Image (cartoon, coloured by chain):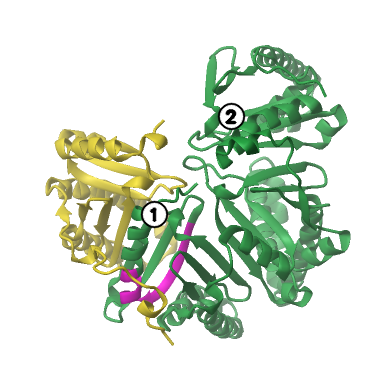
Chain colours: A yellow, B green
Amino acid sequence: MTTDFSNSVILPENLPAIEAAEFNPVDPKFLKILYINYSIMGVILGLSLLVFFLIIKAEVPEFILWISFGLFAGIMAWSLIIIRLSFSKRGYLIREKDIAYQRGLIRYKLTSIPFNRIQHVELIQTFIAKRMNLATIKVYTAGSSSDDLEIPGLPLGAASQIREFLTGKISPDEQD
Amino acid sequence: MNRIDFSQPRRQSIKGLILIFFQEGRSAIKFFWPILVPLVLSKNSDKKLFVVGATLAVGLILILIHTILYYRKFLFHIDDQNFILNKGYLNRKTLTIPIERIQNVNTNQTLLQQFLKVMSVEIDTAGSSKKELKILSLSKPAAVQLAMQLSRYLEAKQTNNPEDQEEPVQKEKLILQLTNRDLLRIGISQNHFQTAFLLFIFCAQFYSQVKEYFQEKAEKYFQEAFVFISQSGWAIISSMIVFFLIISFLYSMIRTLVLYYDLRFNKLNQSYRIVSGLLTRKNLLVPFRKIQQLNWETGPVKKLFGIYKVNILQATSGVAVKTPLIEVPGCLHKHVELLKSDLFGPDELKDQPVIRSSGIYFRRTWIYKGWVPAGLCSPLMILDWRYVFLLMAWILFMLIYSRLTLQKSYFQINQDHIRVSSGAISHKFKQMEFHKVQHLKFSQSLFYKKLGVASLEVGNASGKITIPFIDVKIARDLYDYLLWYAETSSRFWM
């Protein structure tokens, strides 16, 4: 069924393939932030589950509670492993004309934005990230959804450099 | 018509007081109704009348004062380069909009405004994230002149041709006008199941909101209803479905009438103008260059009538703000062809090979939309074993649905255009030009890596087009190609 792609489009010779490029890893300290965020969420979820169990305890057989709790613990442990394993997949790439970010082991995602489409660039530091001297770069395009391109876990120095660089790339016509 | 001078700060029409009063009053009621309802519903006593009356009086006076202050401090004018709007009495706010940044100027007239013989003017910019730039009430000549003065810069910018600036008013050509018979057809061909579902959700939400105030009564009724439903079972469920469908059919009819009454679709030199609506006459001007994407859709009933629903997607301003979706239902095939040739030139995609989604897309759709919901609902079988048939029927239906989804999931491209087909029961098409690409997203799940399929998302300034489950090689090549195209194209995306 599938028609050969190169028949329908005349591709320019030696089109740069993003797949072949070497991505820069994010700061290893960012893994700590991921763990902290994850634990906060885990504790909140665990506590609410506990409260919920205490309420319905009388009406549900005990083994069901144990199974559910085991399931919860299993899922949490599994996600922890996934966070660790997928961490090395995270990376960003700044080429001559565009910026890209990739992430995800189970569900791999790669996003690119050409410089000439950037509307503005934001540098964000969450409370925890501030302590670790890390920052997030957010790149907006026209009509962008919030998940357009976000690079978390950058050392603050590198993040400001990237922001300066990208802001310089925005064509004067586009600047506010 | 005398030329109105907008260079001095001016207020809106004095009749605006009435409109502001209603607008602010309505938002006050919206905000305070959870407090007002229990007050009105509380036990009758001598004091009650006084308390309710006093509250209303104080509220009315406050809104009145607010209205007058708001009106007095709401000033706008045009200087050489900018449209300037001053507003607010506690917090003064000055909005300065460079005229070259203005994307659209829309005038609008609600029923009340028609009665008062005034119009509202809305100024749309790229970049501003709030819809603050609205002047509620201007006399018709003032509104038209303001819109014209602002759009003159707009058209001049578009053409960049000094001769065109001299051209006083553009000729408008009527492309399509909907008659009442067209409206009837459009109403019939709406998706009634979707409306019924939304209606059901709405009722459920309304019920849960009201419940708090009528707790005791509600519980009693609810219990009675529950007993009634569980006793009569299947009959009541099917009659409820029929009931919701009839209601939603009526609702679709009314909605179609209100939204699209006497819709006129006009073509200017470089833009479209769409005027429609029964109670509120909407008047939208859409410059071609602002259009990012064209969608058109047909379905089983629509096919019968030979009509298409067309959506024209414009660049959105800022995050989280939706520019009005421009919908033209009841287009004939020739109208769709006309729009396509206006926006994209001669149709070269027609003869391009069709690239289809992988068969895996069928499997995944069937599992996610058929087996998973059926599995989640399987405990129902404990209540009544006959649910087995319902669940089986659902899975079978989704089998056909998923087959149709796969059949319609394909795309065609040439050097600078893409057209993506999707849908199951209905058939949707989306088309865009490559120089309007804003971002690209490639995604691949671990499970599909071995099978060599991936999905691609092509973003433009109005949203995104997803191409699901295509060959990974094609996805990667297309990714690199589109990125290269957006980076090297000399054409501006807007």
Callout 1 amino acid: Ser
Residue B248 is drawn in which quadrant? Answer: bottom right
Quadrant position of the N terminus of chain B in the picture: top right
Dot 2 corresponds to which residue?
B132
Neighbor class of circle 2 (other Cα within 10 Å; few <14, some 14-19, many 20+) is few
Q: CA distance from mark 2 to mark 1?
A: 34 Å
Rendered location of residue A76, percent (x, y): 25, 60
Rendered location of residue B332, percent (x, y): 74, 68
Residue B8 numbered tag: none
Q: Does the rendering let one see residue A173?
A: yes
Rendered location of residue B156, percent (x, y): 60, 36
Let me know if marks 2 and 1 both belong to one chain. Answer: yes
Would you say A43 lies left or right of B249 here? left
Would you say A46 lies left or right of B87 here? left
Rendered location of residue B224, percent (x, y): 72, 60
Dot 1 corresponds to which residue?
B489
The magenta-colored residue range is B464-477
Mark closer to the chain start, 2 or 1: 2
Asked if disc 2 and disc 1 are in contact, CB closer than 8 Å, the reply is no
In the image shown, does B458 or B221 lie closer to the viewer? Answer: B458
